[in-house]
Image (cartoon, rainbow, N blue to C red):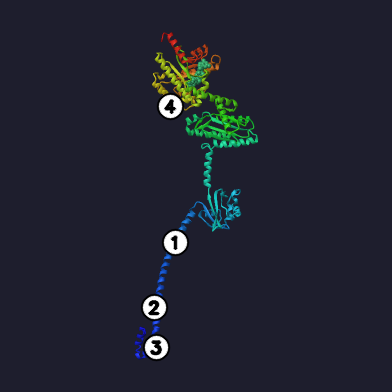
Amino acid sequence: MHKLLARQLKRSKVDDSFAQEYSDIVSRISDAYEQNEREINILERTLFITSNELNERNDLLKKQLNELSDTQQQLEHSISVLNATFDAIGEQITVLDLQGNVVSANKMARSFFKHFNLNAFNYFGQVDTIIKKGNKSTHIIAQLKKDPTQSLSGEFESIDNKHYSYRSLPQLKNGKLIGRVFCIRDISVEKQHKEIIHFQAYHDALTGLANRQLFMDRLEHSLALARRDNSMTALLFLDLDNFKRINDTEGHKGGDELLIKVVERIQQRLRKQDTLARLGGDEFVILIELVKSKNSIEVLCEALLETINSEFIINGRPQYVSSSIGISMFPKDGNTPDTLISNADMAMYDAKNNGKNSYSFYHSKLEAHAREQMEIERKLRKAIDNEELEIYLQPKIGLRCKQIVGAEVLMRWFTDSGEPIPPDIFIPIAESTGLIKKIGAFAIDSAISQLEQWHKNGFPPLQLAVNLSIIEFQDESFIDYIIEKISKSSIRGEQLIIELTESIFMENKEKMSKIMHKLKRYGVAFALDDFGKGYSSFSYLQLLPIDYLKIDKSFLQNVITDEQSDAIAKCIIDIGHNLGLAIIAEGIEDQETLDYVSKANCEMAQGFYMYRPMPCEAFTNLLRDKYNKVGGL
Ligand code: C2E
Ligand code: CA
Ligand code: CA
């Protein structure tokens, strides 16, 4: 019997007879109790299992919930990073749906909308309104309507004059078009920088004028038009004559100031359509289109020469420059920009040779002349290398002692065929090509070794005068070369005279004076050659340590017949003497002139009448004869 039933029966004080009597029922009740107990057991176990499962599930859910919360946090973080990045991008990014409504826009895009008062707008409907009319990109939307799947890119200018670049890509989902993304970038500053760089590449930094490259482009273009219209174009090549002097005296800043002022003056004389460009330094070119006549160019050149030759105030001081202009005309003087420029350049040199402050038109003879000059230059280089140059000596006579007191060293060049090329031809070429330094060194070497030879042979000390051009004289290394030569030789510095022309007055006074004093410390003397021919400044004479004044032969050759030459010569001699200078009269061709200069108290004379320039050997023989005559050597 089920234990619980047994206990209940016992508690009920039911006796055994009752149990036996109802044993069948009791047994069934007992079975029912057992059955019930089994079921309770099963139920309990089931409950136990379910509860465990539930706990596990619960744990899992809790875990998943935690994970979800983590993921959400990560997601929020990612979104905030994404949003920050989206906003930080320097481009506007706008995402649109298929109808063109803004789905999302970054900060740049939002402020762009705000700037143009396009709040919550339909992109497609309004984007065209902010693009400047006439701009190619005004048709962006029309293009998109034609083919909504295409990618677009380009630039546009907004109605408030800003420049933008844009890119637009379709947005696809599973291959299906769902919208479009626009990226727009403000490129105004970039464009401005590009424009500045472009400007700098084609313009001169100092004056803001077109540079060579831009000028060549314009010239090319202009020639094409002139060819089409059968019109005439002029090309002016303008070079300042003594710009270097301003640079030296007023410094580079002063030089720059002058160039800017020159440009202003030139521009005032030009028409709007004319092009002025700076090729560099003090070189300018001017393009004049639709030229009516040669005369109109002449008038312009005269005006340019005059305006440039008028007073400038630089660093508060008055300054003067002049200019030389060469002109070539299209189609007459050339068909290409290069030929026209090179022919105008050639004509400019012709203007310089004609005494500067003038203009010259290109003509074919100039080319022949230039070719000839180049040929001479080529031959001269060879002649220097092959030692074909030689010095001649022209005696100088002391007018009191009536003796040869020295000689002037004059360069001679006899070509292979024995043909003499005069120094007036080859010296200027040597000066313009730099060859003059070699010639100068040769003259110094030859003079010193000649003086040494005479010294060795027991001749009384004579003086030799060497001509140096300003180009050599400005070169410090050449000055050091002369000093070294003197120091290493047996001659005294006093035996060397350097003849310089008035061109030294055009240079920086302080620099000239420094160089001259440097040489003076070694005894070297200075003669001012051809005085009266050019600048003739007595005030400069006082500033520089000059010992001799050579009156230009053009005065002396006319002193007997021409009153004016007579007056000038006397005046120069007087002032020279008052300044403590010894006067050398050169170019004496007759007895009358010799008498004249003797009477005028010139110290020395030189001229064909007494002696022509002669080879060193002839001069030495001459000395030997003279000294033999007076019982010398
Ligand atoms: P310059 O220095 O004035 O030289 C004097 C020129 O006058 C020489 O010409 C000489 O031959 C010439 N002469 C001398 N006496 C008379 C005369 O009575 N009547 C005439 N009509 N002429 C006379 P040259 O030798 O032809 O030299 C010409 C110029 O070339 C020189 O003029 C000088 O400026 C330059 N030169 C000559 N040799 C040299 C040199 O070695 N270096 C440099 N830098 N220049 C030189
Ligand atoms: Ca001379
Ligand atoms: Ca002379």
Q: Which mark is residue 477?
A: 4
Q: CA distance from mark 1 to mark 4?
A: 83 Å
- Say few, some or many: other residues with alpha carbon within 10 Å of mark 3 (under 14 / 14 to 19 / 20 or more): few
The picture places residue 490, in percent across and down from the top left corner, at 39, 18
**Foreground: disc 2 or disc 1:** 2
Q: CA distance from mark 2 to mark 4?
A: 125 Å
State the residue in front, 337 or 50. Answer: 50
Considering only order in the chain, which callout, 4 or 1, is on the residue closer to the N terminus?
1
CB contact under 8 Å: marks 1 and 4: no
Q: Which mark is residue 41?
A: 2
Considering only order in the chain, which callout, 4 or 2, is on the residue closer to the N terminus?
2
Element type at mark 2: helix
CB contact under 8 Å: marks 4 and 3: no
Q: CA distance from mark 2 to mark 3?
A: 25 Å
The answer to whether mark 4 is within 8 Å of ligand 1 is no
State the residue in front, 11 or 598. Answer: 11
**Foreground: disc 4 or disc 3:** 3
- Say few, some or many: other residues with alpha carbon within 10 Å of mark 2 (under 14 / 14 to 19 / 20 or more): few
State the residue in front, 413 or 12. Answer: 12
Q: Amino acid at mark 1?
A: Thr
Residue topped by disc 3: 24
Image-based side of 513 in relation to 130, left or right: left
Residue topped by disc 1: 71
Considering only order in the chain, which callout, 3 or 1, is on the residue closer to the N terminus?
3
Task: Decide: is 592 above or below 514.
Answer: above
Q: At x 52% / y 42%, what residue is drawn? A: 196
**Foreground: disc 1 or disc 4:** 1
Considering only order in the chain, which callout, 3 or 4, is on the residue closer to the N terminus?
3
Considering only order in the chain, which callout, 3 or 2, is on the residue closer to the N terminus?
3
